[in-house]
Amino acid sequence: MHSTTNLLIVNLAVADLLFVVLCIPFTGTDYVMENWPFGDTWCRIVHYLIVVTALASIYTLVLMSVDRFLAVVHPIRSRILRSKKVIKISCVIILWIAIVTITAPVIMLHGTVKYKPLGVTMVTCCFKNSNSFLSVADYQITFFAGSYLFPLMTISGLYLRMITRLWRQGGDIRMSVESQRGRKRVTRLVVVLVITFALLWLPIQLILLLKALNLYHATTKLKVVLQIVAQLLAYTSSCINPVLYAFLSDNFRKAFHKAINCSKQEKCVSTTLPPLRKTSCSRTSTTGV
């Protein structure tokens, strides 16, 4: 499980699991119950953790693409960098620290707001329009750019370079057939993960952006259903990743089985796999909670 690709896959799985665990219960609560029952503090924490885990998942995909890019385009120069365990783990830790720090303002931007639609006091957890330094539109545009547009453009650019390089190397006699197949197989896995992310996250990203710009109002049954479906698609993106790993990554599957067997036997010969080359408030939020 020590290769760069496998380490990033495990990190992606952890981020996806945390995202689903934090999203589904509270999004469901928001649709089923008219009142937010968990208090102001938990409202802020939930929104913050949802953004953190969503970005961790997305930018792990970016790191996976960078790893593939280095392995394919600069295999010799990046070999030492990609083979050192401390460097690989440091990159993952730095990613989490950066995301946790940069997204800290989300805690201040969300909270509970009381309102009286029919003379009865209700409480909702939402983005607070009373924030003077950032409007809901600014917030959602920033989130759309940082969590969807920029990562997608970065990944697409890297893959264009990679595909070009791979096809140019198709007839390179210095590279073994098995080596070429290995690189293309792992690259195919990351491409499928990225395309899946792009397609499944696009609907909810567009709906939240349009809501923030007052161009989409969930005032009809159809629009509410569309928003729910869009959210389910985003959650599916996180749930489907383990299935993709199982079908598309032979090395990860073998390494996972090896790790399980080692834990069962309580002893194992240490082996390293060869490196593979989101009134007074707006209910708009990064996940629609």
Image: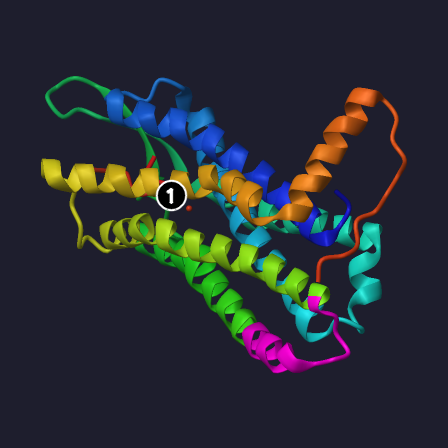
Residue at x 11%, y 35% (from the top left corner):
221
Answer above or below: position of 101 versus 75: above
**x, y percentage for residue 213?**
23, 56
The residue carrying mark 1 is 234
Query: Which quadrant would residue 71 be assigned to in this image?
Result: bottom right
Q: Amino acid at mark 1?
A: Ala
Magenta segment boundaries in residue numbering = 161-177
Residue at x 72%, y 53% (from the top left corner):
4
Please state if 55 lies on the left or on the right of 261 as rendered: left
Q: Nearer the viewer, residue 229 or 98?
A: 229
Residue 247 visible somewhere in the drawing? yes
Which secondary structure type mostly characterizes the magenta part of the structure?
helix
Q: Give yes or no for residue 122 being in the magenta stretch.
A: no
Answer above or below: position of 30 versus 175: above
The number of numbered badges drawn on the structure is: 1
> Which part of the image, by quadrant, shows the C terminus?
top left
Please state if 31 lies on the left or on the right of 233 as rendered: left
* Disc 1 secondary structure class: helix
**x, y percentage for residue 225?**
18, 37
**x, y percentage for residue 182?**
67, 60
**x, y percentage for residue 280?**
25, 38
Please state if 21 lies on the left or on the right of 200 as rendered: right
Residue at x 83%, y 50% (from the top left corner):
86
